[in-house]
Image (spheres, rainbow, N blue to C red):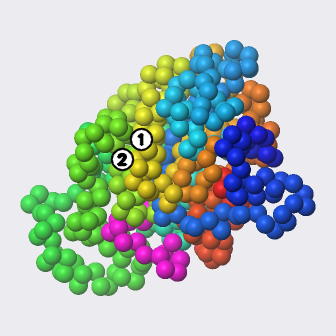
Amino acid sequence: MLHIGSFLAPVCRGTNRRSFLSMASGLPGLLSGGLLRAEEIRPVRSVVLLWLWGGPSHLDTFDPKPHAPAEYRGPFAAITTRVPGLRFSELLPNLASRANQFSLVRSHKNHDADHLKAGTFGLTGFAQGADGVAPSFGAIAARGLNATKGFTNKSGLPSYMAVGRGNPRDVVGPVRGYGGGNWGTGHDPFQVGCSWQGQSDLPGLTLLPGLTPANLGDRRRLLGALDEARRGTDAWAQTNQTAWNLLDNPQARSALDLSREPEAVRQRYGATAFGQGCLLARRMVEAGLPFIQVNFSQYVEAMTPNTDFGWDTHIYNFELLPDRLCPLLDRALPALLDDLTERGLLDDTLVLAMGEFGRSPRITPQAARDHWPRCYTSLWAGGGVVPGRVIGESDSRGEDPVTEPISPIHVGTTLAERLGVNSQIRAELGVLRGGRVLHELF
């Protein structure tokens, strides 16, 4: 591995034009103005955000510290990966074998240790304030694309969908920054549930007994006449149209039907709600949906019924990670990346996996790890990302970044830019002010 500024780059495969320009950008006076920027890469069609709710332990996944004192490094070994010099936790062998297919950011920083506040900040780039809640990255993508010249969503599905039983929450309540925020509920993600058996459902569109999509035509015409007076609000018209599209558009309904997938494909993702949710996300990508968020968790793989621990491992961190959480991620995420690659979709799809923060490097008296917003890791693949890189670096114990801290606003700006929601559109919408694109990834 070669240190270039604040990131690592593999040298064994030689240097392509993009890598050379990226190296040169860190050397004063070389190729001034010649840096290949993310804006110059062809925009992607879709973003898939795997939201690992609860805060995965960065030391026990993608940023192990094998030389730290025992009370920091934990019991898991650090294993080699397909990228020379890069090590992961032994709990992620499948991802380690594919490390040359994606890149990491190891220097994220949030500004709150509370799940709900950190989650809002992590999904919007801003804390909730007196002026309300900023729109989430998915809402910005959907609304921004509608303002983009030439964009047409042909999928029949909403441009922003969330897979899971609901929005991320803890015992206190739900994250506030999951959707439209100050823009209103008309910009919230459209929810689709997915069970471990691969059965999807639309909780907001349950038909009354005796009604089917086939006999809704007359009712729709009547509703159109009755709703004429309400069409002054764009949100109502948009929500109404979305509902009808999902009810009577065979193409849209087909995209949500996992029974059309061969059993062998479904098995690759694993018989879990998260695994089948990732498969559902791939079908949405095929349909042309711009922004898909797969939530792990809203009671997804919960340790006990009707709880939502997710990756929040205050207790049993060193039991839940090897027995449950890491095997789920290490099966579903590689399956998604392989599937997108085999179908020729990965270059046009940006995949991001991350949570709202990491976990405390020093092991607690409960033999676990607590919330840690000061440093955590994300994984990026496809969509123009140069694979095999490590952006940023944490200190020897994983407590703080020793390079530029990467804020959630930079994440949102990068996602928007890669989808074609450029700086002019963002300025017109008044969103993501102060963010920058993570050019080091591209």
At label 2, which amino acid type do we have?
Leu
Residue drawn at x 12%, y 68% is 214
Is residue 100 inside the magenta stretch?
Answer: no
Left or right for 62, reference 191: right
Looking at the rendered image, the quarter that the C terminus falls into is bottom right
Mark 1 Cα shell of 10 Å, populated few (<14), some (14-19), many (≥20): many
Does residue 55 appear in the picture of this structure?
Answer: no
List x then y, in percent, for residue 324: 43, 26
47 sits to left or right of 401: left
Q: In this view, does 204 lie above or below 169?
A: below
Q: In which quarter of the image is residue 265?
A: top left
Q: Which of 201 and 78 is in front in this view?
A: 78
Q: What residue type is labelled 1?
A: Ala
Labelled pair 2, 1 in contact (Cβ < 8 Å)? yes
Q: Which portion, as a residue range, is magenta?
A: 145-161
What whole-number distance in Å separates the C-alpha atoms at marks 2 and 1?
8 Å
From this viewpoint, which residue is outermost toward the right? 29
Name the residue carrying label 2: 279
Q: In which quarter of the image is residue 208?
A: bottom left
Q: Can the viewer see residue 15 in this picture? A: yes
Q: Name the residue under label 1.
A: 335
Name the chief secondary structure element in magenta.
Answer: loop
Q: Considering only vertical position in the picture, is 40 above or below 9? A: below
